[in-house]
Amino acid sequence: MMLAMMIDFGAYTGHAAGITTALLWTATSLLFTASGRRLGTTVLNTIRLCCAVILLATTHRILNGYWIPHAQSEQVFYLAISGLIGLSIGDQALFTAFVEIGPRLSMLMMTTSPILAMLFGWLALGETLPTSALLGIGLTVGGVGWVVLERPKVKSGSSPRRLRGYAFAMIGAACQAGGLMLSKIGMGHGWLDSDQHMPPQTATLIRMCFAALGMIPIIIIYQRRMRRRAGNAAAFPRVGSKSVGVTFALCGAVVGPFLGVWMSLVASDRAPLGIAQTLCSLTPLFILPFAVLIHKEKLSMRAVGGAVVAVLGSGLLFLDF
């Protein structure tokens, strides 16, 4: 009787992985912010991707006994496109939105990502969600959006610049959701038997390798633009120690592109896309305590209320009614 009443925690592995992803990406955002101020975006992107590929390949060798993953050509195709869309184009679009309209408005636009993921999961994989999950996604997205808008408004430049920023942020949201969907298909969901599905860690390695390749032309173009504008100093801002910046970048690469992306694929592998993306998008809430402790910010009742609403919404994702 007691065993029958116990909760099947294994059914919530994907949910737990989604929350873990948000926690890891919270640490990543703090570490990469500190690193970017010392090294610049170009150097930071190079370090994080190279480090992630090395860590993932080494881990794959330890866990599986070989360096090069075994995969069907169709799986490699889907994962390659996923890496290019989700990690190369999507991240670059989001970084551009940060510059154009700031992180607060960019993150607000990114709250549409769970909705897009739910739509993509329904269209591509036939995933349907219970009423509790739909309510949970709505509350979570609303709560996160409320928190993101908590700070006072600041000037965000001219109207064309704002439009560019909004457009890039929406591209980032769509790429993040689409990349997660393609990753799930690449692992084998929707067209292969469950015993043929690729492990999330292997899929992450393939995805990250192609993401790194996809970033090469973007990095080259960015470096040339910065050098034309302000010389080589643009790639190495004179803010703090470079060695400290490299340390922050390496630590951020471990918890973000390595562990964080890995956990996000575990979430999408074990849970519907809409639920996985929603839980992975809780980073703006988890970062609030650090804003208070590190930056000495004061949180309004609106921020606290939004966090409570989002947490309640996340709780509904664990129910089924």
Image (cartoon, helix red, strand yellow):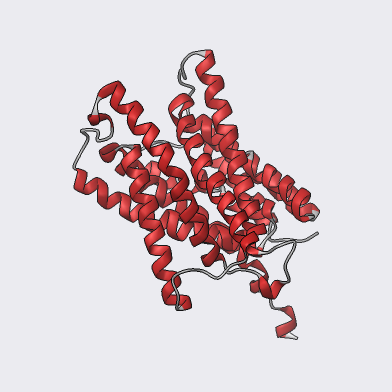
> Quick check: 234 left or right of 132?
left
Q: Position of residue 285 (x, y in %)?
A: 51, 45
Residue 262 vs residue 60, the one in the foreground: 60
In this view of the protein, can residue 294 be seen by the observer?
A: no
> Quick check: 230 left or right of 150?
left
Q: Position of residue 120 (x, y in %)?
A: 72, 47
Q: Position of residue 80 (x, y in %)?
A: 56, 53
In this view of the protein, can residue 46 be seen by the observer?
A: yes
Residue 110 to residue 134: above or below: above
For the point 35% across and 41% down, which residue is it? 33
Q: Position of residue 3 (x, y in %)?
A: 71, 84
Quadrant assignment for the N terminus: bottom right
Residue 121 to residue 36: above or below: below
For the point 24% across and 35% down, which residue is it? 236
Quadrant assignment for the C terminus: bottom right
Residue 287 to residue 207: above or below: above
Question: Residue 40 occupies which quadrant of the picture?
Answer: top left
Question: Residue 268 occupies which quadrant of the picture?
Answer: bottom right
For the point 55% across and 57% down, which residue is it? 264
Residue 134 vs residue 183, the one in the foreground: 183
